[in-house]
Image (tube, rainbow, N blue to C red):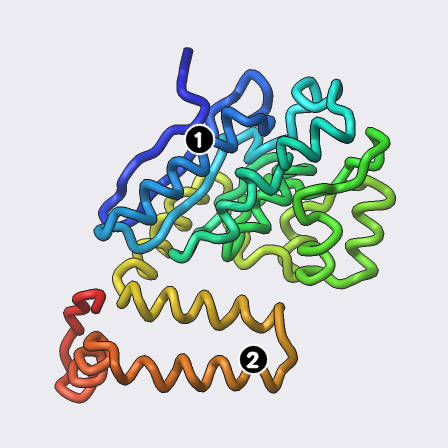
Amino acid sequence: MADVVITEVHGKVGLIRINRPEAMNALNNEVVDGITAAVDRFEADENIGCMVLTGSEKAFAAGADIGFMKEFDYMHAYKIDFITRNWERLRTARKPVIAAVAGFALGGGCEIAMMCDMIFAADTAKFGQPEIKLGIIPGAGGTQRLPRAVGKAKAMDLCLTARMMDATEAERAGLVARVVPADQLLEEALKAAATIASYSLPVAMMVKESVNRAFESSLNEGLLFERRVFHSTFAVQDSKEGMSAFVEKRKPAFKNR
């Protein structure tokens, strides 16, 4: 049986690929536990500065595995801490994560993509939260992260009508960072990840933490957090190297410390 999650290392970039083509990369515990294990591995690897999560040309992930969920009752879902137990690992990753989405990213697939720090979409990508068709609601952030990305009106539209949003609309709405031709998706995502990984890892982690803070606090509190983190970068050796290299007109040699 093929691994449902495949990992590769591309220089300083860790690639995580969902590999369940017979089920359009539907998410069950085996898949999500595999993603979690891959994130843990790349977080612990000091050579890795950024991660890319992707699927196949047809589907990033077509949603949660309905066959896996259909016999759940409330107490079972509550006792196993469904979703919280393993899905949220992407959200807590400290290193930057790019979702490279082609084909369908629906339901849990859209939610997994939103747990990443940015989404690169192929021009074939389709996003949606169609859970209402099944008599359930989004349960991995669809009603919470989606409004923060695209606004209340469009989130209501997607969650209540179950319609799909193409890559162009998703970029226009603010869900997607970049739209690229499908045959260039992984190349572009890996290139951007390599750029991020070429910088100081501690500083990249600080940037990620600071931007995320904007969604968890008031503007004044967020600015205070940013200012304190900015001040702390003057204790980072890489900041001295970066500024010295700029003044000396040379490429910096960051040491991640």
**Crowd around label 1: few <14 · some 14–19 · many ≥20 (10 Å):** many
Q: From where the camera sits, is residue 140 visible?
A: yes
**Crowd around label 2: few <14 · some 14–19 · many ≥20 (10 Å):** some
Image quarter hosting the N terminus:
top left
Q: Residue at x 41, y 15 (%)?
A: 2
Q: From where the camera sits, is residue 173 visible?
A: no
> Residue 222 got which mark?
2
Q: Residue at x 44, y 31 (%)?
A: 34
Q: How far from the left and from the top, in percent, is residue 30?
A: 50, 24
Query: Measured along the vertical axis of the image, is residue 121 above or below residue 23?
Result: below
Q: Indicate the quadrant where residue 49 lies.
A: bottom left
Query: Measured along the vertical axis of the image, is residue 26 above or below residue 214?
Result: above
> At numbered mark 2, what does the secondary structure look like: helix, strand or loop?
helix
Q: How far from the left and from the top, in percent, is residue 29?
A: 55, 27
For disc 1, the marked residue is 34
Amino acid on which disc 2 is placed: Gly
Q: Residue at x 82, y 29 (%)?
A: 134
Image quarter hosting the C terminus:
bottom left
Query: Measured along the vertical axis of the image, is residue 59 above or below residue 166?
Result: above
